[in-house]
Image (spheres, grey):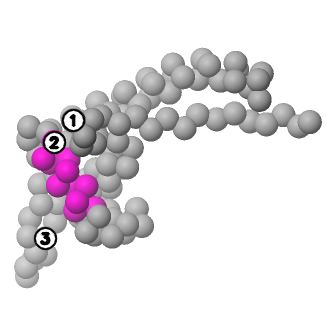
Amino acid sequence: MATRTVELELKPRVMLGEVRAMGPGKADLLELIEETGSISAAAKRMKMSYRRAWTLVEAMNGAFKTPLVEASTGGAGGGGARVSEAGKEVLALYRRMQAELEMVARQYLAGFQQRL
């Protein structure tokens, strides 16, 4: 039998009661909003509807003490969005946590590999 590769797929979520305050998809959305300056453009890059992206932004903004995303309405000059300083800090904290969790979990892969 050929050896199969064992991989990790960790999806840590930060919960506030029943609400997912932060998870991998929200972190990706924050990164793309920061990169594009737009919730709409970030949603397109993630292949999700603008409405879904806006719902995720509202959930994040409502969960944290200060908004993670600040949006400006459209008009002649167009709207836009930016990740606030709090958003940048939360994103960095989440990505550090994600990296450390993966580092610890990798220690167990060999044990699983032997049993699969």
> Along the polypeptide, which appears first: circle 1 or circle 3?
1
* Mark 2, secondary structure of its residue: helix
Q: Which mark is residue 31?
A: none
Q: Which residue is mark 2?
A: 63
State the residue in front, 109 or 83. 109
Which quarter of the figure is the N terminus placed in? top right
> Along the polypeptide, which appears first: circle 2 or circle 3?
2
In the rendered structure, which amino acid carries the disc numbered 1? Answer: Leu
Q: Which residue is mark 1?
A: 16
* Mark 3, secondary structure of its residue: loop
The image shows residue 104 at horizontal and vertical percentages of: 51, 19
Q: Using the numbered discs, state the Cα–Cα distance from disc 2 to disc 3 in whole angstroms.
A: 24 Å
Residues at circles 2 and 3 in contact by the CB criterion of under 8 Å: no
The region drawn magenta spans: 53-63
Task: Please give the name of the residue rendered at 39% of the width and 44% of the height, measured from the top-left corner.
Answer: 24
Residue 63 lies left or right of residue 56; in this view the side is left
Q: What is the quadrant of residue 22 in the picture? A: top left
Task: Please give the name of the residue rendered at 30% of the width and 34% of the height, measured from the top-left corner.
Answer: 14
Q: Using the numbered discs, state the Cα–Cα distance from disc 2 to disc 1 in whole angstroms.
A: 7 Å
In the rendered structure, which amino acid carries the disc numbered 3? Answer: Gly
Residue 108 lies left or right of residue 84; in this view the side is right
Residue 83 lies left or right of residue 23; in this view the side is left
Q: Which residue is mark 3?
A: 79
Q: Using the numbered discs, state the Cα–Cα distance from disc 1 to disc 3 in whole angstroms.
A: 30 Å
State whether residue 103 is above or below residue 56.
above
Q: What is the quadrant of residue 90 in the picture? A: top left
> Along the polypeptide, which appears first: circle 2 or circle 1?
1
